[in-house]
Amino acid sequence: MTIAATSLQNHIVLITGAAGTLGTATATAIEAAGGTVIRTDLRGKAGMDHVLDVTSEADWQRVVAAISDSHGRLDGLVNNAGIVSVGDVEQTSYDAFRKVMAINVDGVFLGCKYAMPLLGKSKAPSIVNLSSVSGLIAGPGTVAYNASKGAVRLLTKSVALHGARKSPPVRCNSVHPSFIAGDMIDGMLSISRDREKMLAKLLVDVPMGRLGQPHEVANAVAWLLSPASSFQTGSELVVDGGLVAR
């Protein structure tokens, strides 16, 4: 691998959920590699280029049309927007389950669907979908999150097989983080009466014994967007400190 192979110079990349911890870190990594970032998130989030509710088909159509008018193409799509939900199959309400699936799965589907024509105008298009180690292994208390992230894993593979038929191929890969410092883990810990005890319990499952850092996931995403990963599609890149290696 050469340094040039990891460059994102002249790459235009759309990120969903760009105001969150991983979205912010990913935008920083892409810009550091020379890319141009189009930041999207819900209304009221500061510093966004477009308001985008990933569950809204109309929003996706509007944002993609705007990018087509302003740039004429899209080189990368990072489907990062997502929420976590804690609860087993009996505790979780149907409304809560549907909300998680809408954001975490429908949002990825709509992104891949409506960005595909613009990606087809790129010389080296790439989609990166944020799944989770919870899309690879299950837990009794994360039924909705497990279901959604498992769906993202296989949705990614289907999109990759479809994209491989195009010329040039539209690559599509998933990234599977474990416990990453930031807003999502903070939300999980906030429901505990003893934050430190809960964090210690989570880290027991991580062989490296620490939380991952946002830039460690962001660098993996940037690599999958870059020419350095040009023969990689339909794959799962695990960023988990060894959690699923047990």
Image (tube, rainbow, N blue to C red):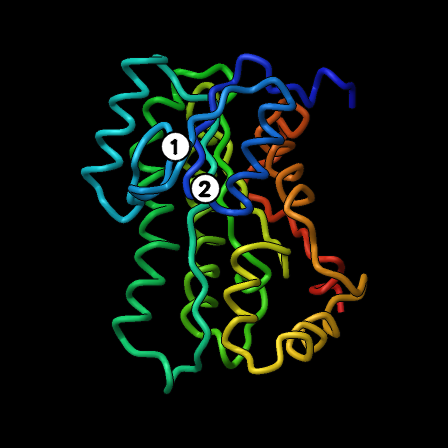
Against 158, residue 203 (above or below) is below
**Mark 2 or mark 1, which has the lower sequence index?**
2
Count of numbered badges drawn on the protein: 2
- Tag 2 residue: 19
Quadrant assignment for the C terminus = bottom right
Disc 2: CA contacts within 10 A as few (<14), some (14-19) or many (>=20): many
Q: Residue at x 68, y 75 (%)?
A: 196
Q: Residue at x 53, y 56 (%)?
A: 183
Q: Is residue 20 left or right of residue 223?
A: left
Residues at circles 2 and 1 in contact by the CB criterion of under 8 Å:
yes
- Amino acid type indicated by mark 1: Met
- Tag 1 residue: 48
Considering the numbered disc 2 on the image, is that residue within a helix, a strand or a loop?
Answer: loop
Position of residue 11 measured from the top left corner of the image (x, y, whole percent): 52, 18
Quadrant of res 113: top left
Disc 1: CA contacts within 10 A as few (<14), some (14-19) or many (>=20): some
Against 83, residue 17 (above or below) is above
- Amino acid type indicated by mark 2: Ala
